[in-house]
Image: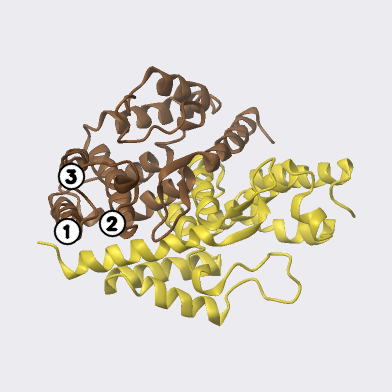
Chain colours: A brown, B yellow
Amino acid sequence: MVTEKLLKQIDFIKEIDKIKYIQRRTKLFNSDRQENDAEHSWHLAMMAIVLSEHSDYEIDLLKVIKMVLIHDIVEIDAGDTFIYDQNKNHENTEEELKAAQRIFGILPKEQAEDFIKIWIEFEEGISNEAKFARSMDRLEPLLQNTSNDGGTWKEFGVKYQTVYDKKKVIKNGSKKLWKFAENLINDSVQKGILKK
Amino acid sequence: MVTEKLLKQIDFIKEIDKIKYIQRRTKLFNSDRQENDAEHSWHLAMMAIVLSEHSDYEIDLLKVIKMVLIHDIVEIDAGDTFIYDQNKNHENTEEELKAAQRIFGILPKEQAEDFIKIWIEFEEGISNEAKFARSMDRLEPLLQNTSNDGGTWKEFGVKYQTVYDKKKVIKNGSKKLWKFAENLINDSVQKGILKK
């Protein structure tokens, strides 16, 4: 009754435990402790549920949640790349695709293909679901940095225009959330925690 | 354009960051580090997605995911109670209901009511979705303890029969997963990491 298929699924469930060790640069809210990828992914899924009504497009919420829950699993092999790193491309690397194939490939074939497809869809950022999922991914660290007195912006000397350009992705998913985010960014300049 | 409603949602998103500080007794896989509630909830959501085909009943997967993502948020106020604690009732406490009302109550009214309803449904464990969600909640620490040389069973001297009785909840969601879990429990006795 315990099938080969189930055993593969259990192996995958054990393997992905490793994202709990992948540290991001951003810190928890009002905190000095860095966030890890599992915590980050949980938070994005919660945000997607809470904020879904603000999506500019009709979205399949279950798909959005799948996207945000799995989007960082590739970092088990490829590591976290800081969004403001000027030397390393943040996304769509060969390394990440290899990681997706190895890690999702632990699953039974059909399921593996499904996960890889959803991960690629998120990375491409074209579908309505990917647009909204990516808004969540940009919004969380914005909330964190503004609650952490500038957080990684201050720590790494990131300037207003760079932040603004990176965060503009939010607009692709929701004009309302972008308005909110834009206000936060501008307030941060006013407060002196983000430099023009 | 930035509404009162959105501001309440953002307040809630900030408040729930606190579950990242709630430590469980169980440790990560092959590890000495305790798991926190955000990591645990992320893992259960991933398990629900990967294992949903093994549910004995038709389930609304989105609802199951919502349940497991939010089920421990009440612990921000009520704290984590160890499942094998003999002095304290593990579930459905007055304290947890109060916590649900305060924390979900930060959300706009309709959304707050919806979250409280889903949380109560999970706690009651009667609906198909709640049964499957609760199977996930019992299965994860079983996988952890068996990968951690007995983990909390050894640490707190928990015996076979107690473990068996607590884990039997898995059967309510999936006979197949219960068969797998039962084998794991029996193997643990064979290996000497769980005492009869």
Image quarter (top left, top right, bottom left or bottom right) of the N terminus of chain B:
bottom left
Q: Tell me the CA gap for discs 2 and 1.
A: 9 Å
Task: Report the residue marked by disc 1.
Answer: A187
Q: Secondary structure at mark 1?
A: helix
**Percent position (x, y) of residue B152?**
75, 55
User: As rendered, which of A150 and B56 lies closer to the eye?
Assistant: A150
Task: Report the residue marked by disc 3.
Answer: A160
Instruction: Tell me the residue at 26%/28% (across/down).
Output: A124
Instruction: Tell me the residue at 37%/55% (across/down).
Output: A46
Circles 2, 3 touching at the beta carbon (< 8 Å) = no
Q: Amino acid at mark 2?
A: Thr
Q: Tell me the CA gap for discs 2 and 3.
A: 13 Å
Q: Residue furthest left?
A: B1
Question: How many residues crowd mark 1 within 10 Å: few (<14), some (14–19), many (20+)?
Answer: some
Q: Amino acid at mark 3?
A: Tyr
**Percent position (x, y) of residue A47?**
33, 54
